[in-house]
Structures are given as structure tokens and as C-alpha cells.
Amino acid sequence: MQTQSITQKLANPTRFMYLSGKILPWLAGAALLCIAYGVLLGFQTPPDYQQGETVKIMFIHVPAAWLAMMGYGLVAVSSFGLLVFRHPLADVSAKSAAPIGAAFTLLALVTGSLWGKPTWGTYWQWDARMTSVLILFFLYLGLMALRSSLEDEALAGKLSAVLALVGVIILPVIKFSVDWWNTLHQPAGVMKGALDPVFLQPLLISAIGFSLAFFALHMQAMRNEILRRRVKARQVMEVDRASHEQGAQA
């Protein structure tokens, strides 16, 4: 007998509901602890010699920006799984990830604007990085609007998946915009070791916490979507049964 892979095991919605129910409380608790510890460490860091206390916005802005991109990557991978592999939970994953990714993208835009005011002297510039992240936010909104505009969920899922895969081109644009164009936004410094260790540790802990929170929210949203679809399927069955009984009596 061949053993099933983790993906195959999780393809069963009932098994996913059972496993996620066990994992979710621990995941949410770990996320809360990491975020609290990371933010606490962050606000105990000394002021930056150039940006002063405003540099501490970084501990929320940077993880939010990372997760804005990761969220769309998850939507795209899930969409690929729906169109190519017909994975039973792929559409559930894509639909559930979009609002969460949109929320983190909005958080990145807002905190970036608040950080930009004391640093650049303005809340907004049509900077390549900022503009491309704004486009990402509109892509999220477009995916959600497309789904809500169609009553046929299967068709909505497929069309949303196609849009998500077309829109994935925005991710490398966001990533390399500071290298391709002359922008106000500072280049990436975390991976290149340019960030002072006193800021790096709380930033990484905060990023881990926000990432865990993203996955906890995504898992809960998938659970909610599965339950919604089950209720809808049961309602359809009851309507069909009632119609059949009325036809038999007539």
C-alpha cells in the first residue's frame, strides 16, 4: 500500500478540518507571543542616528510588506493548483488568502506613508516601490470583486485563478523596483546585512510573528470557507429534495 503525501492527506476537507483544528490554537498562540516580544524589543531599541524614533515603524511596516507579497504568492500557487492539479482545497486557499493579503498590503501602505512623512517630508510619492505595492493592493481588490460578481463559484474560482496568475508579474516588479529605477525608497538591506544587529533581531522576531499570524488567519479563513460551502451544499440538497417531493405529490 502506498503512503499518502501530506498534500494528499490535506486534500480531504474533513481531514483538513480535523488537523487544522488541532494546529490552529498553537499557531495563533505562537504568533501572538512572537509579535508581542518582537514589538516590545523593537520599541526598546535606541533611536536611529538619521530617522530618530520613527525608525521603529519598521517593525510593523517591513513584515507587513513581506506578507503582502507572500500572500499574493500564496494566491498564485493555490490558483495554479486549482487550474493544473484540480486540488480540492486549492480554490478555498486562494479565496481565503486574498482578503488577508489585501489587509497586510493596506497596512504596508499606511505604515509606509506614516514613515515617509518625517523621512521624505510627504505621506506619498509616486515612487516605483510605493506605486507597485498600490497596484498589488488593487489586484487583491480585483480578485475579490471578480469572485463576488459571479454567482457560479466554479467559474468565479477559475477566472480568479487566471487573473491571479497573470498578475503575479507584479511581485518581481515590487522586489526589484528599487534596483531598476531611481526611487526614494531605500534598497533592501536585511538580506544584505546592512541593518544594524540591534534592529535586526526584533525585526526578524516580529516578522516571524506576523508570518505565523498570517498562516493562522489563513487556516481559520479556510475553515470558515469549507463550512460555508458545506452549509450551501446542504441547503441546495434540501431545496432539491423539497422540489422533488412537491413534484411527486403533484
Image: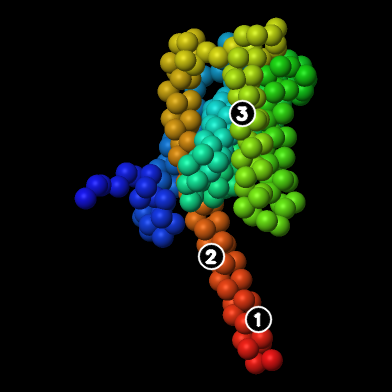
Circle 2 sits in a helix, a strand or a loop, which is it?
Answer: helix
**Residue at image x 52%, y 13%?**
189
| Distance of label 2 from label 3 (alpha carbons) | 31 Å
Q: Position of residue 198 (x, y in %)?
A: 45, 18
First in sequence, mark 1 or 3: give its number: 3
Residue at the extreme left of the image, as rendered = 1
Q: Is residue 72 visible?
A: yes
First in sequence, mark 2 or 3: give its number: 3
Q: How many marks?
A: 3
Amino acid type shown at disc 2: Arg
Amino acid type shown at disc 3: Val
Horizontally, is 164 left or right of 211 in the view? right
Q: Position of residue 158 (x, y in %)?
A: 62, 45
The residue identified by callout 1 is: 243
**Residue at image x 53%, y 37%?**
80
The residue identified by callout 2 is: 230
Mark 1 is surrounded, within 10 Å at the Cα level, by few (under 14), some (14 to 19) or many (20 or more) other residues, namely few
The residue identified by callout 3 is: 168
First in sequence, mark 1 or 2: give its number: 2
